[in-house]
Image (spheres, rainbow, N blue to C red):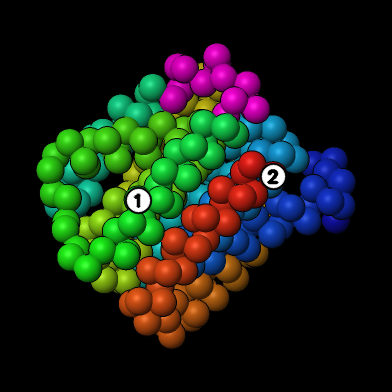
């Protein structure tokens, strides 16, 4: 109890952090979008940059669960197309975010996610499923994912758009995303520590404090995802992304 009291969080803040930890665990092992949906709430409670530093250690812990379970399902060809551009997007986000306040941040993220949802829905309603394999599409998605993950841990919507566009089956969708998120989240750590100074020993301890909740969410995510059909899973991802937009603007 003394360990938890050192963080000096209110009961409401602990509730938000705990629910976010559970949602992150669930989202990383299958129920994508749940964690992203809670990120705007964290930004509202703690502020945009501060919340990004609190959430990042939690994301990496959950990423490790997902990578271990889905490691054989990754599409490495798609990963190699996305990752270099995502790293560039992270650099851009690191050095431009200082000129963006929290309100502008929410508006930028909202616009990006709304566009992602519109394109997702448009693709799902088409009778002919065209797979956009052009390198420019991968570059655009990678840059957007890198930028959004750096300024607000919200790469989920953009990455989901790209992976859904590739018509990946459920397990490949999760496995490819797991490796992608782990790579970019680990890449972001030095920027948060040395440039933004949003990750400290205290934020790491907070992540460890909610690790059991993250683990519970990860296990539940695996169990629930097994019972979702391919079609229902795609609709779920789109629905959760849309819910993120509503929470972000709220």
Q: Residue at x 13, y 49 (%)?
A: 133
* Residue 200 or residue 49, whichever sits in front: 49
In this view, 228 is above or below 170: below
Q: Name the residue under label 2.
A: 250
Q: Residue at x 14, y 39 (%)?
A: 135
Is the magenta region chiefly helix, strand or loop? helix
Q: How crowded is mark 1: few (under 14 residues within 10 Å), some or many (20 or more)?
A: few
The reply to whether residue 61 is in sight is no
In this view, 11 is above or below 152: below
Q: Which residue is drawn at 51% across and 31% down?
A: 108
Q: Which quadrant of the view contains residue 92?
A: top left
Question: Which image quadrant: the N terminus?
Answer: bottom right
* Residue 179 or residue 121, whichever sits in front: 121
Q: Residues within 10 Å of mark 2 (few under 14, many from 20)?
A: few
Residue 9 position in % (x across, y down): 83, 44
Residue 110 is covered by the magenta coloring: no
Q: Which quadrant of the view contains residue 169?
A: bottom left
Residue 94 is covered by the magenta coloring: yes
In this view, 159 is above or below 170: above
Q: Residue at x 36, y 35 (%)?
A: 144
Residue 31 position in % (x across, y down): 48, 67
SS at circle 2: loop
* Residue 229 or residue 199, whichever sits in front: 229
Q: Mark 1 points at which residue?
A: 119
Q: What stretch is highlighted in magenta?
A: 93-105
Circle nearer the N terminus (2, 1):
1
In this view, 167 is above or below 115: below
Q: In this view, does 162 lie to the left or right of 158?
A: left
Residue 214 position in % (x across, y down): 59, 62
Residue 5 position in % (x across, y down): 85, 47
Q: Is residue 204 left or right of residue 231?
A: right
């Amino acid at each position: 109890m003394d360990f938890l009291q050192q963080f000096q969080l209110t009961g409401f803040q602990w509730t938000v952090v705990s629910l976010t930890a559970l949602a992150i665990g669930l989202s990383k092992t299958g129920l994508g979008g749940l964690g992203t949906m809670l990120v705007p709430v964290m930004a509202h409670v703690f502020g945009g940059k501060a919340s990004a530093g609190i959430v990042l250690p939690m994301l990496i812990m959950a990423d490790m669960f997902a990578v271990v379970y889905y490691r054989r399902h990754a599409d490495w060809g798609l990963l190699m197309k996305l990752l270099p551009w995502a790293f560039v997007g992270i650099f851009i986000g690191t050095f431009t975010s200082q000129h963006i306040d929290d309100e502008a941040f929410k508006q930028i993220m909202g616009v990006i996610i709304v566009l992602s949802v519109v394109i997702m829905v448009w693709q799902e309603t088409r009778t002919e499923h065209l797979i956009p394999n052009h390198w420019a599409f991968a570059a655009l998605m990678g840059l957007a994912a890198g930028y959004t993950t750096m300024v607000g841990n919200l790469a989920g919507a953009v990455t989901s758009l790209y992976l859904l566009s590739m018509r990946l089956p459920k397990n490949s969708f999760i496995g490819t995303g797991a490796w992608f998120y782990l790579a970019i989240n680990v890449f972001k750590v030095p920027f948060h520590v040395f440039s933004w100074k949003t990750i400290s020993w205290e934020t790491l301890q907070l992540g460890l404090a909610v690790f059991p909740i993250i683990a519970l969410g990860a296990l539940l995510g695996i169990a629930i995802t097994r019972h979702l059909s391919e079609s229902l899973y795609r609709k779920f991802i789109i629905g959760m992304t849309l819910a993120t937009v509503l929470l972000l603007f709220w």
